[in-house]
Image: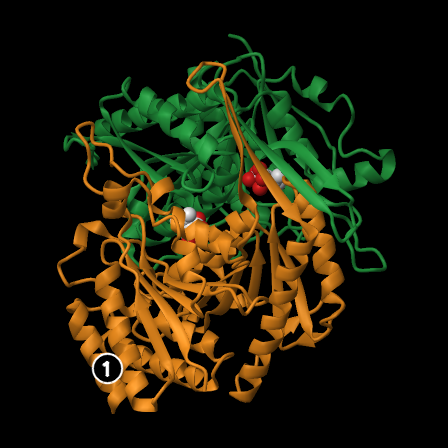
Chain colours: A green, B orange
Amino acid sequence: AQTTRIAVTPGDGIGPEVVAEAVRCLETLRAKHNLALEWTRFPWPSHAWHEEYGESWPADALAQLKAYDAILLGALGDPGPMDDTNRYLLPDSISLAPLLDMRKGFDQWVCERPARLLPGARQYLKDDRAKDIDMLVIRENSEGEYVSQGGRLRPGKPDEVATQMEVFTRRATERIIRYGFEQARKRAGERVQEGRTRAFRTLDGRSCESQVCLVTKRNALRYWGDMYTEVFEKVSHDFPDVATHHELVDAACMKFVQCPWAFDVVVASNLQGDILTDLAAVLSGGMGVAPSCNLNPTDPNLPSMFEPTHGSAPDIAGQGIADPTAMLFTTARMLDWLGRIDPKLAQAGKELFDAVAADLAEQGNQQRATSQIGDAICKRLQA
Amino acid sequence: AQTTRIAVTPGDGIGPEVVAEAVRCLETLRAKHNLALEWTRFPWPSHAWHEEYGESWPADALAQLKAYDAILLGALGDPGPMDDTNRYLLPDSISLAPLLDMRKGFDQWVCERPARLLPGARQYLKDDRAKDIDMLVIRENSEGEYVSQGGRLRPGKPDEVATQMEVFTRRATERIIRYGFEQARKRAGERVQEGRTRAFRTLDGRSCESQVCLVTKRNALRYWGDMYTEVFEKVSHDFPDVATHHELVDAACMKFVQCPWAFDVVVASNLQGDILTDLAAVLSGGMGVAPSCNLNPTDPNLPSMFEPTHGSAPDIAGQGIADPTAMLFTTARMLDWLGRIDPKLAQAGKELFDAVAADLAEQGNQQRATSQIGDAICKRLQA
Ligand SMILES: CC(C)[C@H](C(=O)O)[C@@H](O)C(=O)O
Ligand SMILES: CC(C)[C@H](C(=O)O)[C@@H](O)C(=O)O
C-alpha cells in the first residue's frame, strides 16, 4: 500500500511538548497495526526563526509541506520576550502568519470544529443538558472578512480612515454550505447506526434527523448576508432530509450559551466562524480538549492541516506540564481524515480518540505532567 | 424647572405590552416625586405600518423624535405572518431599520450594556463566581462594519461577488475609547464609595481599581486593528489610574464564558460589540433582564435611545405573558441618563432599578403575567 506522509510542525511554546506525545501515540499505533505511515519534523519556532532569519517561517515552507498528505501543527504565536516599553517583540501578525498562509496556500477552505462535552471535560454551563451537546461548527476558511484588503489613509493623523474589505464569492459560499449539508447527512447516518436519534423540524413541519443552521448578520451586513441566504435556500433543496435554520450571529452566540444542545451542524463565515468555533471549544470543555481541522476536501494533492485550538502558552512552555489532550484529539481527527487514503488510518484514529476519551473520563482535567498523560494513553493503545 | 420629554415608541409584538408597564412605573414615580416629566406615545408597529404605507416608520419619524430628550423603545422586528412559501413577509432589514436609522440619525455613537448577575436572574454558568460578574460592554455604534457600503456583483450568477466595506475613523475610535476609560474611572469611583474594591494589574505591575479591555481582531483584520491598538495606547496615557488589556474577539468570547468576572469595562467595534453585548446579556441572566442604551454623550440636542435587548417575540405577543423586567431595567437606565438634565430623574432611576431588582430577587424568573410583575413593582415604588 501507498505510504501516508505527515509533516509535523511543532511550532512555538508548548507546541513541541504536546507534539512529542502525539508522535509517541502515532508510533504506538504504527507498530500495533503495521501502518504505512511516515512523518517528518519541521522545527520552525516562529519567534526564534524570525530572530535568525527575519521571517516567520522559511520562504519555501509551503513548497516543502506540499509534498505531504497532512500537516500536524503544535502551536504558533510565541511573541518572544517583551521589549523595554513592555511591548512584545514579535506581533501576532507575524508569528501567526504561517497559519493563514497554509490555509490560503493549500486552499483549506473548511475549518471544522466539533463540540461534544465528553465525560471528564470541564463543564462551564450549569444546565446538565450540556452533556447532550453534539454539534459541528463549520467555518468558511478561504475568504470573507479575512481577505486582508484595505488600508489606512493618513495613518496616525486625526482624520485617519482605516478600511477593511470583506469579499465573498458565490462559489466559495456554495461549496461551504454544501459541505455543511453533506456533514449533517453523514452525522445523521452515523447517529442512526449508533441508535442515537435526534429530531429537528423543517419550516413546513416535517421532522428530520439532522439540521444545518446558517449563521449570518444579514440584518446589518446585507450584501453577503443576502447572498448566503439565497445560496443556503437553493442548496437546501438538494437535501430535503436535512432541516434548516438561520440565526443571526449575535443570537447564535447567545444560544450557544443558553441551549447549545439544540444545534447540529452550524455553517458560518470566516470571522463569525472564528468566534463560533472558539465558543464551541468552550462548550466541549475549553482549549484543553478542542481540535481544529483546516481541510481541503476537493484537492487530494494539497495537504489539510490539523492543530489544537489552544495557543503556544509561552508562560508554561518548557515545564513539561502542558496538557496534550487537545493535541491528541487533533491527531485522532487527522487520522480519521487520512482514512480517505488508507481506511486503516481511520480505524487507528478511532482507537486514539477512544483512548484519549477514556483517559479524560477517568482522570478528568486534574494536573498531570505532559508525558504522564502521553504514557497513560500509549498504554491504553497497547492494551 | 425644565420639563424632560420622552418619546415612547412601543413598536412591535410584545413591545406595547412591556412598554405599558414602563409607563405605569413612570407615572408612579412622577406622582411620588412630582417629577417634571412628560411622554408622548408613537404607535408605529413596523409590520402593520409597512402594510399600510410601504415604509417601516413614517418618513418624518426622526424629525418628530428629535424634539425629545430620550426615546424609550419597546421592541422592533415583527416579520408579520408567513407567506405561501414559508417566508416571512417583512424582512429584518426593513422591520429593524428604524433602530439603525435612529442610531445614525441621532449620532448615538455609544451602545452600552452592563452585565451584572443580579440575585434571582437565571445563571447559565456553573461557576458561582458568576455572581461576581460586573462588567460594562461599550460598543462603537456609529461606523465600522455597519456602514452599509458594498454590493453584489452579478447577483445570482455563479461568479457572483459580494463585498462589504468596513470603515473606521480615528475620530470615532478615539471618542469611544476615551468614553470607555471615563466609564472605567467612574465605575471605580462608585465602587470605592460602596466599599467594593477590585484590583487589576497594569503591564508594568501596578495595581488599579479599574480596567479597560480593548477587543479587536487585529491579527486578521489588521488595518483598523492596528489603528484601534495605537489609539488605545495613546488614550491610556491620560488614564494612568486605569489598567489596560487587549483581547482578540474570539478569545474574548471564550473568556466571557470561562471567567467573565475578570472583566471590568470592555470596548469593541460595532459588530464585535454586537456579539459581545449579546453574550453580556446572557451573563446577566438573558434577554429577560438586559437593557441596551444607545447614547449620544456629546450633543444634548439629540435624543439617546433605550431599548431592552430582547426582540418583539411575536409568538407570545398579545397574551399578556411577556416579562417586562428588561424593559423596566431599561427605563431605569434611561432615567439615570436623564439625570444630566434633572438630578431628580437619576434618583428616580435608582429607585426603579432597586424595585425591579428586589422583585427579581424575590420572585426569580418564575412565570407571571406581565401586569402582575408591573403591579408588584409599582407597589414597591409606592411603599
Ligand atoms: C490566529 C488567528 C489568525 C486564527 C484565526 O483567526 O483564524 C485563530 O484564531 C484560529 O481560529 O485559528
Ligand atoms: C437588530 C440589529 C440590527 C441590532 C444590531 O445588530 O445592532 C441588534 O442586534 C442590536 O444589538 O441592537
Q: Amino acid at mark 1?
A: Cys
Which residue is located at x 73 percent, y 73 percent? Answer: B240
* Figure quadrant of residue B123: bottom left
Whether B209 is drawn above or below A330: the answer is below
Q: Secondary structure at mark 1?
A: helix
Task: Measuring from the top left, give residue A126's x and y in whole percent.
Answer: 33, 60
Q: Residue A283: x and y, percent?
A: 40, 49
A107 shown above or below B321: above
State left or right for residue A185 relative to residue A266. left
In the image, residue B366 above or below residue B359: above
Residue B7 seen anywhere in this rendered image of the structure: yes
Q: Which residue is mark 1?
A: B378
Specify the quadrant that holds the C terminus of chain A. Answer: top left
- Across and down, in percent, residue A121 comes to 41, 51
Q: Chain of mark 1?
A: B
| Res. A287 visible in picture | no
Instruction: Determine whether, in the image, residue A219 is placed left or right of residue B139.
Output: left
Residue drawn at x 34%, y 90% as measured from the top left: B33
**Residue B290 sits in quarter:** bottom left
- How far from the left and from the top, in percent, is residue A210? 26, 31
Q: Is residue A55 left or right of residue A247?
A: right
Which residue corresponds to the image point at 53% horizontal and 13% vertical from the top-left?
A299
- Front in this rendered view, residue A276 or A326: A276
Label 1 crowd (10 A; few <14 / some 14-19 / many >=20): many
